[in-house]
Image (spheres, rainbow, N blue to C red):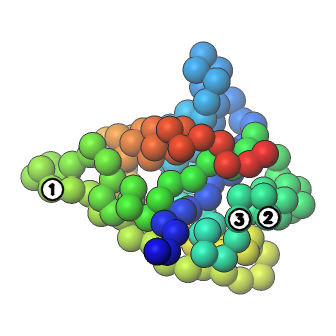
Amino acid sequence: MSEELLFYRSCAPAAALWDDARDRPSSQLFMLNSNDEGLLSVAQSAKTNPKQFYQEFISAGMASRGVWGISEGEISPVPKVRDEAGNEIILGWSEDEGPGKVTGHCLINMKRWVGKKKLKKIAQSLRNVAVERGILHP
């Protein structure tokens, strides 16, 4: 039996990414930045592990509170979120390795939801499953 594919996301120490009251990442961890072009940057477990991802992330000069993960099954479909027609929301992903990127770098496609209120619900759902799984490293 093969292990479930996970996508790792590092939580920077920025106040917007951390919910101090609940001592956990905020949903901003899974929101897009203005320069993301609708693509959420993650690393896949088929090519790296949480420790290696964390080490590569901080070695690149970035700060991290830790690594959280979501599974392929949690983006296809996104738990407890439906589109306006009541259909499940399916997010695709693609590999995006290359120079200057962490091992296993890939992108989750959220382009359809850019500028829509539903994006916040998607981010909250992904944050919830990641927090339920727990911090993966350190």
- The residue shown at (60%, 35%) is 25
Whether residue 124 is visible, yes or no, is: yes
Residue type, label 2: Gln
Number of the front mark, 1 or 3 = 3
Check the picture and name the quadrant holding the C terminus: top right
Distance Cα–Cα, label 1 vs label 2:
37 Å
* Badge 3: residue crowd in 10 Å (few <14, some 14–19, many ≥20): some
Q: Nearer the viewer, residue 66 or 39?
A: 66
Q: Which residue is mark 1?
A: 87
Q: Quadrant of residue 64?
A: top right
**Label placed on residue 52:** 2
- Residue at the bottom extreme, as displayed: 98
* Badge 2: residue crowd in 10 Å (few <14, some 14–19, many ≥20): few
- Residue 80 placement, left or right of 61: left
**Label placed on residue 49:** 3
Residue type, label 1: Asn
